[in-house]
Structures are given as structure tokens and as C-alpha cells.
């Protein structure tokens, strides 16, 4: 459908669309929204690399296809390596890669494919300094295989392999700070983003494109199916993740930290606000909630300090 | 003019890669192959080879990066061995399924445990169901030639399959032999300017590669890999012929040696073929009717040529440096498959030897021939024999 110019002018997101309707994500899926935004920001001169994850399915089964851009499906742990190969080949053929008018090589991997099995390939990709953008869409578990914990699953979450029970066997580890691992590689650009703040996400995607070298974005992507949350609450949950400082929005650019609005607008809301909309947290005891709250506070204070000292 | 010089097989492989002018090389060190990428990085550093060299953090990433680069439309190359090739296993299927003509040099080495860095073929033989073509070199010249040949076959529109070239750890990888380096211009003519003939990621014409295929489509996709392997049989013959015309060296999928009136034919691959041919000469002097055959191409399996060979012998003895537990060697299975429905067929006897770098001696081969002669005489024999086994330390 053609969007009238008068409407276009008022849009806060690019009008162009390279993610077709008819994809196979669940209702309220954050990942499908996120991928759509990526293509809005980068257009069709993009090569998207997708490992085994929900997006394998979302992108469509042969002969159907959701993306109006090059799409390369690869093995679960290989995103960083395949991106490296594609980038090197494009350069060898004389293409401009990244930057204005450059071809975009984008890794689009889940939290499992990034925080766990793909961490090594990600590290190699970052370290070698390839001109490409790696996006970890973070739905905090292995959703494609039926909701198992990943390194990115938060404390207290129910998943099918942290099911709770007589021995109270919920996830006992705090969320792995993948972005800190990425920053430890001294990358030129790393950021967190959320599907609840698409303008901020698009801004970061554009920066990730402009700044030479490897960029990394960790995108908070609600998954109603895995989080046991109402499909119409995905955006609200994602917003609360930011407002409670559970998933603050920030950027790391050439050694400097910057916390992005609205993360700092006011004091963080209590973590219960974020938890209560999701069935996956319903088995947490009051003590569990306190433990998670303390972790959130601690991480938030740490981030504020970093922004203060290295801002 | 071609240059006659001496070098290790690893260097010959690096030279072959340089002559083929791949645009992307991604490699990770492993004994005994390390020297291949090392030498290539020197070529790149000196500006003798215009390519991107990706220093990946593992073999899994090496082959993944080659997959990415090949899918983007350039010629790619890597080298590995043993654990490194085993680590690549998952991605090898992907490369073949996507029909990417990647070429990999393999310094054939055993697999752990126990840890052992020496020669056998278990690493590449274990990749035989991945859809990749497999060539085995008898000497360093063959290592160089077969890499060039592999590129040509792999990139043929009728084939479009990745290929690996095996050459024995240390026996070849680290042994200096005379090698002729062909002229760059002749290689350029032979291989031609690289243009991808498979579906590739053109930024101007988006496609999807490697997509999810439901049961309604998966089998057909796999069948195309079967077909490509079948097509490769003919293409390999054509390329061998063209290679001979341009470079003067003759190759065939199954190379026979003094088989004409042979009762026993010793079949093997790789550098062991050299030993076996010498042994055949030695027995022939004593009047024993024995011949030899070498498989230069292991995948696609040259069943036709094997059937022809089988017509000549009473016993085919398979000498192989690999094992499929509870079955025997891979060649034994493959030969069985080629001959099972033939009306007349020789006796097949399997000999597992030389694992983990153990020398194969004339004494071992005497034992092989002894068992074969017993079989001809109608005596009982074991189908699978471990030769040179030190029973006293078991
Ligand atoms: C080597 C390998 N191991 C396991 C799997 C099975 N597998 C496919 S997707 C997946 C989980 C993906 O989780 P994540 O990366 O978080 O993406 P999501 O499905 O949550 O979107 C697993 C375990 C696989 N495809 N490959
Ligand atoms: S399971 Fe979750 S991530 Fe996967 S498609 Fe459904 S909502 Fe999206
Ligand atoms: Mg996930």
C-alpha cells in the first residue's frame, strides 16, 4: 500500500518495507518486529545471516520468503564466522561494505546463538574487526527448541529445563552480560536496544552502519510464547524492562558509555512491575524477587558509574 | 616455463592455492597442515596472492567463513586435518547442500583418542557422507595437481560440489620431493576467470540460501547432491583429460599397475600406493601374479572402474588406513557395494593397517598376500584383518 506523502512526513520510522507480511512468527513476537526494523534501516542492499533460531522459521520455509534482502541461513554457532566470510568476499570483489551506500552484512542471531554456542565465532568476528553489524535479538531462552534456558535467561525464570518443582529448580544464575563481553573486545560501537523503542533502535542501527568496524546491538525481544505473557503485552513488557532498569538502553561508542533516554528519566520502577505480566516469573518467591532486584540495582549503579566516569 | 623444484606436499598445496587465485582463504593451524596456510599468508603478505586471509578462531569458523565467502561469489580455499576436519563436519554438509565449490586440502591424520598426529585416513574417510568429493594424492606433485583439478571439477556447472584433497601426514606433508610448478598462464587458462555458477548473494539481486525445507521438498534438494556426484564422475574424466593435454600428467580415477594377468590385486590410496607398486615389482620378480590399483578419486566412488578392475582378479585385497568398527574399512564396504550384484566377482578381503602412522612394511604385505593365496586355494580366511597388530602388548 502506498503511503501518502503527508503521512510519510510525520512518520518517525522509515516508511520503506522489506519484511513481507505472511511471516510465521507467533502473535506479539518481538523478533519479527526487530527484523522488520533492521530492514527498514538498512534497505534491500543487505545480506542477513541467520543461524538456527526462531527467525529461521519466521523468515519462511521454501519456497516462501519473508525478506526482501539477501538471506543466508547457517548453522547455530557460525553467525560471526559466516558474516566474516561474506564481508571478506564482498571486499575482495571491490564492494563498498558498510558506511553510506555500502552493502550491509548483518548477523541476526538469538541469545542462545550469541551468548552460548556462538560466542566463540562472535568473539573472532569482533576481534578481527570486520565491517558488519551483529544483532543479538534477546528473548532470554532457546525458544525454537521449546523454551530452554540460555546464558541470557534471568534469575528466577521458568523454562522447560528450569521447570521449578519440589526442589525449586528455577533458573539460578543471573543473566549473562553479553554486551560486557563484547565491549571487552574494545569494539567501536555496541549498544542495547528494545523493540519498545523503535526510533532509538533505528538510530542505533544507523550509527552501527556509519561507524567503521564491527558493531553489536543487543535487542530486547519479548516472546509471548516462551514468557507465558499475553500477546498484546509485548511492547508494554519491553518498555517495563527499560523502566525498571532491568534492561537499560545504552551505547558504548569509541570507549565512551552513554545511557539513552528514557532509561534515566526517573528512578527505576520496582522489578515486580516487569515480572508480574509474565507467567515465566510466577514461581518466584519473595526472596527470589529480592535477589533479582538487588542484581538489577547493582548492575544499574555500575552502568551509571561507567557513564559518569567514561561518558 | 614450469619450474622444477623440490618441496613438501604442504608447500605444493599452498602453491596450488596460489595458482588457483582464491579470493578468500580462512584457516586455522593444526598439525600436519599448519604449513599450508602459513605459506599462503606469506604469499598474501608479499603481495604474490591478492586475497583476503581470515585468521579465524577455529576450523569450524574456517569452513563457515569459506561457506560465507563462497556463497557471496568468490573462489575459496582452506586446509586442515584430523580434529580440525572433524570439527568442520557439521558445516561440510551445509557446503555441499548449498552446492558451494570450496576446496580443502587435508593432511590426512588420525583422530583422538589416543592423541596421535601421524598418518591415517580416518579424518577424511569419516566425511564420506557429507556430499564432498574426495581425491587422494600419492605424492607431492599429485597434491598440487589434484587441488587444481578439484577446483575445475568443483566449479563445473554440472557438478558444483565442494572437494577435499587428502595427502598423508608427514609421509607427504613434511617430506621434500621433486615437484613441477606449472605456469600461471596455463593454470589461468585451465581454470578460467572465476564466476560463480551457483546461486549467490548478489547485493543487487536478493535471494535466500539454505532455507528451511519441509518433508515435501527436502528429499529433492538432497537428490540434487546425489545427481551432482553422479555427474562428477564424467566431469572428472574430462578434466583429467584436459589436465593431461595442458600439463602432460595423466590421471585416472582408478590407476592400475601390472594388473593384466594378476590373480591378486592390492588396492589402496594415497602414498601407500607407492610402497605397494614397489612391492608388486618385487613379487613379480619371484613370479607371483600380483598387481596393484590406486583410487585417486574416492568420492564420487568410481564403481564402474572398480567393476572393470574386479574382472581381472581372483582376490582383491583392500589395504586401508581407516576403520568402521564392527564392519571393516570403508573401501571394503564400497567395493562390496560395487560388486554385490555382479554375476562373477573376485573374493574381497579387507586389511586394516598403518593406523596412526604405523609403517607398512614388505613383511606386512607378505602377510596380506599370504592370506589372499590361502583364499585362492579354497582355505578359510578372515574377511577383515588387522595387519601389523602388536598382539603381545594387548
Ligand atoms: C549445533 C546445534 N545444536 C542444537 C541445535 C538446536 N537448536 C536450534 S535453534 C536452538 C535454540 C535457539 O535459541 P536462540 O538462539 O536463543 O534463538 P530463539 O530460538 O530463541 O529465537 C537450538 C538449541 C542446532 N540447530 N544446532
Ligand atoms: S516462540 Fe517467541 S521468538 Fe519464537 S516466533 Fe514465537 S514469539 Fe517469536
Ligand atoms: Mg532466544
Image (spheres, rainbow, N blue to C red):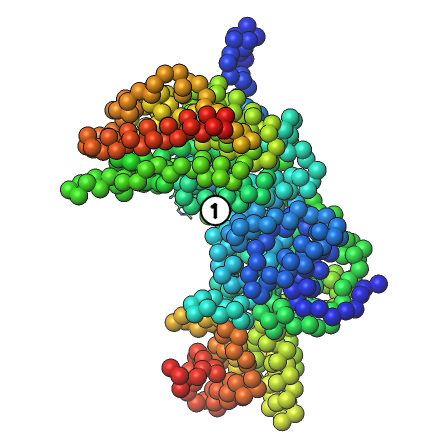
**Which one is nearer the viewer's eye here, B135 or A120?**
A120
Residue at the image position 43 percent from the left and 70 percent from the top: B114
Residue located farthest toward the left when viewing the structure as drawn = A166
**Residue B198 occupies quadrant:** top right
**Residue A145 occupies quadrant:** top left
Residue at the image position 46 percent from the left and 68 percent from the top: B115
Any part of residue B359 in sight: yes
Residue at the image position 55 percent from the left and 9 percent from the top: A9
User: Which subunit holds the residue at mark 1?
Assistant: A
Query: Residue under circle 1?
Result: A120
Image coordinates of residue A26 in percent, x first then y, are: 36, 28
Image coordinates of residue A134 in percent, x first then y, are: 51, 35
Image coordinates of residue B138 in percent, x first then y, are: 64, 72
Image coordinates of residue A277 in percent, x first then y, are: 27, 23
**Residue A210 occupies quadrant:** top right
Q: In which quarter of the image is ligand 1?
A: top left
Q: What element carries label 1?
A: helix
Q: Is residue A220 shown above or below B92?
A: above
| Drawn side of residue B335 relative to residue A221, left or right | right
**Which one is nearer the viewer's eye here, B83 or B230?**
B83
Amino acid at each position: 500500500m502506498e503511503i501518502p506523502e503527508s503521512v510519510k512526513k510525520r512518520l518517525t520510522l522509515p516508511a520503506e518495507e522489506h519484511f513481507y507480511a505472511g511471516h510465521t512468527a507467533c502473535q506479539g513476537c518481538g523478533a519479527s518486529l526487530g527484523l522488520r526494523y533492521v530492514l527498514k534501516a538498512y534497505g534491500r542492499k543487505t545480506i542477513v545471516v541467520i543461524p538456527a533460531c526462531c527467525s529461521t522459521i519466521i523468515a519462511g520455509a521454501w519456497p516462501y520468503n519473508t525478506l526482501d534482502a539477501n538471506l543466508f541461513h547457517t548453522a547455530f554457532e557460525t553467525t560471526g564466522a559466516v558474516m566474516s566470510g561474506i564481508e571478506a568476499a564482498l571486499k575482495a570483489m571491490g564492494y563498498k561494505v558498510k558506511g553510506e551506500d555500502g552493502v550491509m552484512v548483518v548477523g541476526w542471531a538469538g541469545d542462545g546463538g550469541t551468548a552460548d554456542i556462538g560466542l566463540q565465532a562472535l568473539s573472532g568476528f569482533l576481534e578481527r574487526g570486520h565491517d558488519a553489524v551483529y544483532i543479538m535479538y534477546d528473548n532470554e531462552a532457546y525458544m525454537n527448541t521449546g523454551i530452554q534456558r540460555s546464558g541470557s535467561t534471568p534469575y528466577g525464570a521458568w523454562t522447560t529445563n528450569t521447570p521449578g518443582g519440589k526442589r525449586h529448580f528455577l533458573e539460578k544464575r543471573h543473566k549473562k552480560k553479553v554486551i560486557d563481553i563484547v565491549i571487552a573486545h574494545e569494539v567501536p560501537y555496541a549498544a542495547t536496544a528494545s523493540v519498545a523503542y523503535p526510533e532509538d533502535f533505528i538510530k542505533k542501527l544507523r550509527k552501527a552502519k556509519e561507524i567503521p568496524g564491527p558493531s553489536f546491538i543487543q535487542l530486547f525481544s519479548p516472546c509471548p510464547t516462551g514468557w507465558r505473557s499475553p500477546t498484546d503485552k509485548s511492547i508494554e513488557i519491553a518498555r517495563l524492562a527499560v523502566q525498571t532498569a532491568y534492561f537499560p538502553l545504552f551505547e558504548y561508542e569509541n570507549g565512551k558509555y552513554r545511557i539513552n533516554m528514557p532509561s534515566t528519566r526517573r528512578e527505576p520502577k520496582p522489578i515486580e512491575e516487569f515480572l508480574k505480566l509474565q507467567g515465566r516469573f510466577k514461581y518466584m518467591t519473595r526472596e527470589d524477587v529480592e535477589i533479582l532486584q538487588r542484581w538489577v540495582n547493582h548492575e544499574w549503579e555500575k552502568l551509571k558509574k561507567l557513564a559518569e566516569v567514561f561518558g | 616455463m614450469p619450474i622444477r623444484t623440490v618441496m613438501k606436499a604442504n608447500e605444493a598445496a599452498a602453491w596450488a592455492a596460489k595458482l588457483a587465485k582464491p579470493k578468500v582463504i580462512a584457516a586455522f593451524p593444526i598439525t600436519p597442515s599448519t604449513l599450508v596456510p602459513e605459506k599462503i599468508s606469506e604469499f598474501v603478505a608479499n603481495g604474490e596472492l591478492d586475497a583476503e586471509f581470515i585468521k579465524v578462531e577455529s576450523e569450524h569458523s574456517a569452513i563457515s567463513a569459506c561457506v560465507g565467502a563462497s556463497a557471496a561469489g568468490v573462489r575459496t580455499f582452506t586446509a586442515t586435518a584430523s580434529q580440525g576436519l572433524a570439527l568442520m563436519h557439521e558445516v561440510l554438509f551445509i557446503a555441499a547442500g548449498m552446492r558451494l565449490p570450496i576446496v580443502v586440502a587435508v593432511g590426512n591424520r588420525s583422530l583422538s583418542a589416543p592423541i596421535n598426529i601421524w598418518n591415517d585416513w580416518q579424518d577424511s574417510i569419516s566425511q564420506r557422507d557429507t556430499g564432498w568429493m574426495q581425491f587422494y594424492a600419492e605424492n607431492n606433485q599429485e597434491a598440487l595437481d589434484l587441488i587444481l583439478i578439484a577446483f575445475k571439477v568443483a566449479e563445473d556447472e554440472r557438478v558444483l560440489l565442494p572437494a577435499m584433497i587428502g595427502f598423508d601426514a608427514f609421509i607427504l606433508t613434511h617430506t621434500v620431493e621433486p615437484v613441477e610448478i606449472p605456469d600461471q598462464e596455463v593454470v589461468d587458462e585451465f581454470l578460467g576467470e572465476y564466476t560463480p555458477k551457483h546461486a549467490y548473494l548478489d547485493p543487487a539481486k536478493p535471494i535466500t540460501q539454505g532455507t528451511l525445507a519441509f518433508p515435501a521438498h527436502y528429499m529433492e534438494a538432497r537428490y540434487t547432491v546425489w545427481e551432482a556426484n553422479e555427474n562428477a564422475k564424467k566431469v572428472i574424466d574430462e578434466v583429467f583429460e584436459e589436465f593431461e593435454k595442458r600439463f602432460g600428467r595423466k590421471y585416472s580415477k582408478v590407476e592400475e599397475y601390472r594388473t593384466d594377468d594378476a590373480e591378486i590385486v592390492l588396492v589402496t590410496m594415497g602414498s601407500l600406493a607407492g610402497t605397494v607398486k614397489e612391492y608388486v615389482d618385487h613379487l613379480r620378480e619371484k613370479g607371483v601374479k600380483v598387481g596393484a590399483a590406486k583410487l585417486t578419486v574416492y568420492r564420487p566412488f568410481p564403481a564402474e572402474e572398480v567393476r572393470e578392475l574386479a574382472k581381472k582378479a581372483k582376490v582383491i585385497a583392500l589395504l586401508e588406513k581407516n576403520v568402521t568398527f564392527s564392519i571393516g574399512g570403508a573401501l571394503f564396504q564400497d567395493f562390496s557395494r560395487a560388486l554385490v550384484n555382479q554375476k562373477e566377482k573376485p573374493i574381497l578381503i579387507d586389511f586394516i593397517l598403518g593406523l596412526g602412522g604405523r609403517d607398512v612394511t614388505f613383511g606386512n604385505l607378505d602377510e596380506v598376500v599370504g592370506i589372499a593365496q590361502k583364499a585362492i586355494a579354497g582355505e578359510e580366511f578372515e574377511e577383515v584383518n588387522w595387519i601389523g597388530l602388536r598382539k603381545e602388548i594387548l
